[in-house]
């Protein structure tokens, strides 16, 4: 019984279909089907109900998935204990917020790949509310998310950066009063379904600010471009690590009247990738610390030394 087939079986259980599992384990749909047929022949049991349009795990198959996770966890832990921290290898799937995709994430991946050539990192972009359940189900190993409104006991959230809210406006704007700008200029709203979007709306409501909404956008890049073209102002989190060649904009601090966005890495407590996740977490702290843009939160930050 190969570990590869067990990992494919687990991927099917987590993703729901052979096609989705194929993308996760980097093989074709046909290869997934062949692996599962070979596993059934080897065990001499039927793991899937193939009478339905898309094969579904049988009761026996679901029971085997539970044991398969235990076997794979033991195997991965064994390998990691042998290679040690200086030889981290394997695959790590990290979820990431769009605001980190052009700055923090690529820099962290570059550094870790240079340090650990045998480490393969996959990236799954998404909003915090979408990434957190994927980590919980085991679809991804960890994710950079905003501070969760709740956290299950089997989950771990390690904060690493505190991003204060700022007002973005064009260089041509004469005023530097954040509340005046939000109320008297066209307002470009950060996606209110994002956790940081809710944080921004909370500040607007607490300050009783009435806005003239011009548009609602998902990414900081899109918002910055609109502001650069003098189409309005926006309230956004200050990046913990600047992207290359940032647009020339006025970035006006809001101050202590607004709660900052706290970024952290979320994972399962029982993850077999704990060494890889910890290495990634420490690199995030180092990058934020080196950038010097925001307050660093983490075990290796200068404030805690």
Image: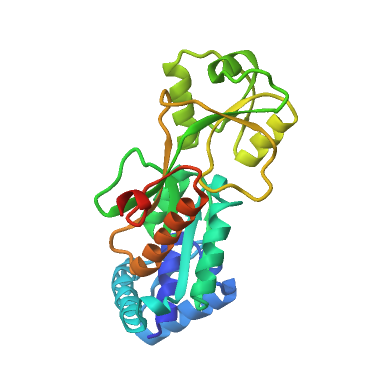
Counting from the top left corner in percent of width and height, residue 12 is at 45, 66
Q: Quadrant of the C terminus?
A: bottom left
> Looking at the picture, how far across and down is residue 104, in whole percent?
54, 53
* Residue drawn at point x = 69 percent, y = 40 percent: 247
Left or right of 181, for residue 165: left
Location of the N terminus (image quadrant): bottom left
The image quadrant of residue 86 is bottom left
Residue 228 in percent (x, y) is at 72, 32
* 299 vs 8: above or below: above
Toward the right, the furthest residue is: 229
Q: Relative to the observer, which residue lies in front, 253 or 52?
A: 253
State the count of labels: 0
Instruction: Name which quarter of the figure residue 114 lies in.
Output: bottom right
47, above or below 135, in the image: below
The image shows residue 244, relative to residue 218, as above or below, that is: below
Residue 217 x/y as whole percent: 62, 34
Residue 192 makes an appearance in the image = no
Residue lying furthest left in this view?
153
Image height of 152 relative to 25, above or below = above
* Residue name at image x 47 percent, y 46 percent: 130
Q: Residue at x 34, y 52 (%)?
A: 158
Towards the viewer: 29 or 77: 77
Is 253 in front, or is 39?
A: 253
Q: Is residue 54 left or right of residue 171?
A: left
Horizontal placement of 166 versus 232: left or right? left
Residue 148 position by quadrant: top left
């Amino acid at each position: 019984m190969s570990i590869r087939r067990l990992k494919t079986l687990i991927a099917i259980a987590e993703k729901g279909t052979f096609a989705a599992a194929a993308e996760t384990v980097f093989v074709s749909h046909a290869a997934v089907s062949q692996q599962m047929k070979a596993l059934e022949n080897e065990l001499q049991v039927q793991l899937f109900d193939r009478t339905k349009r898309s094969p579904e795990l049988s009761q026996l198959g679901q029971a085997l998935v539970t044991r398969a996770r235990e076997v794979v966890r033991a195997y991965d832990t064994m390998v990691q204990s042998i290679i040690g921290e200086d030889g981290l290898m394997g695959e790590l799937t990290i979820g990431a917020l769009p605001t980190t995709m052009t700055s923090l994430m690529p820099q962290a991946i570059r550094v870790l790949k240079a340090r650990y050539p045998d480490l393969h990192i996959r990236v799954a972009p998404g909003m915090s509310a979408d990434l957190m359940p994927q980590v919980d189900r085991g679809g991804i190993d960890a994710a950079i998310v905003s501070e969760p409104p709740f956290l299950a006991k089997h989950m771990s959230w390690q904060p690493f950066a505190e991003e204060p809210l700022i007002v973005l406006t064009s260089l041509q704007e004469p005023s530097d009063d954040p509340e005046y700008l939000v109320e008297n200029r066209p307002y470009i709203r950060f996606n209110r379904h994002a956790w940081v979007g809710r944080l921004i709306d909370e500040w607007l409501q607490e300050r009783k600010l009435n806005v003239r909404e011009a548009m609602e956008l998902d990414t900081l890049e899109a918002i910055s471009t609109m502001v650069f073209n003098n189409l309005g102002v926006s309230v956004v989190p200050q990046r913990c690590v600047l992207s290359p060649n940032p647009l020339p904009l006025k970035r006006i601090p809001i101050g202590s009247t607004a709660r900052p966005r706290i970024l952290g890495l979320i994972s399962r407590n029982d993850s077999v990738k704990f060494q890889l996740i910890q290495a990634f977490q420490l690199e995030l702290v180092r990058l934020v610390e080196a950038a010097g843009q925001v307050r660093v939160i983490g075990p290796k930050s200068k404030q805690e030394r």
